[in-house]
Image (spheres, coloured by chain):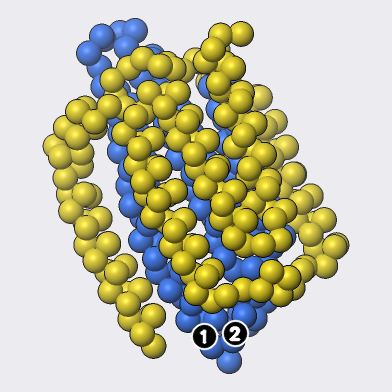
Amino acid sequence: MPIQYYIYLCLALFSIGVIGVLTRRNAIVVFMCIELMLNAVNLLLVAFSKMFHSYALAQNATSTTGIDAQIFVFFIMVVAAAEVSVGLAIIVMMYRNTHSVDINFLNRLKN
Amino acid sequence: MSIIQVLFFALSAFAIGSAIMVLVSKNPIHSVLWLILVFFAISGHYILLNAQFLAIVNIIVYAGAIMVLFLFVIMLINIKKDSEPQKQFLVKLLGVVAGGSFLTLLVALVKQTAQIQGRTLLMKDGVIGLIHPLGKALFNDYVVPFEISSVLFLSAMVGAVIIGKK
């Protein structure tokens, strides 16, 4: 499978996430679009790891080149889980103060 | 077309269609459910690439834990179905145009890049996605980031509790 197909798929998913962040006003949906972008990047990292792995296997049959990208994906998932827990706590606090999850309430960052 | 190509295109269409449905759903709960389907499609891609550990972790962590957290919060704050104020049509159109321009720019860039022309992926072979090599790499080369991430989790947990108790 050529690497271009995976790049195009991940670009499409990432752009859908960008469009979601730009067009929706519900803070929770915006947050979900950020998760979508993170997942697109994860998939691209795994695809590139397999690309370099196939290149390195041609030279050395026992090579583990490309394993670092998969470890990176693991750490991105760890950071995303921590980010979601804090972000959702912030959204709940915002809802308690303003009784809305509209991001336009937060555009001045005061009051 | 081989079976791998058929699976790739089917999973890609499924992922992109579900991702678009995340955006167009009015009800946030429907958005969450569509996003879970996107994550399952991405897990299918991981299995296709023989990254089995990441496929399982993706289902457990993303579809299992994070999305359930989203559902809990949506049910906790009880958003009405049509209480979400919509952006103006012009703003939405500009957002779609901006995202589409971004996509077009990057696709044109990828088409020109010489380093990736003719490079192919190892699809269903290779051992680097299995638990054994990943565990060895994680606990030999990446043991310090692993420990630091546990501290990060602790601080995130403390932060979430403090923010939630205010």
View extreme (left): residue: B140
Q: Is residue A30 left or right of residue A56?
A: right
| Disc 2 target residue | A99
Q: Is residue B146 above or below residue A96?
A: above
Q: Is residue B141 left or right of residue B66?
A: left
Q: Is residue B136 above or below residue B115?
A: below
Chain B color in figure: yellow
Residue B130 percent coordinates (x, y):
27, 27
* Amino acid marked by disc 1: Arg
* Amino acid marked by disc 2: His
Residue shown at 43%/74% (left/top)? A89
Chain A color in figure: blue
Query: In the rendered structure, are the residues bearing label 1 and label 2 in contact, judged by CB atoms less than 8 Å apart?
Result: yes
Q: Are labels 1 and 2 assigned to the same chain? A: yes
The picture quadrant where one finds residue A30 is bottom right
Residue shown at 41%/27% (left/top)? B47
Q: What is the spatial separation of the Cα atoms under label 1 and label 2, in whole angstroms?
A: 6 Å
Residue B76 percent coordinates (x, y):
50, 74
Residue B5 percent coordinates (x, y):
57, 16
Subunit bearing disc 2: A
Residue shown at 25%/9% (left/top)? A61
Does the rendering let one see residue A43? no
Between B8 and B27, the residue placed more toward the observer is: B27
**Mark identifier at residue B94:** none
| Disc 1 target residue | A96
Identify the secondary structure beneath mark 1.
Answer: helix
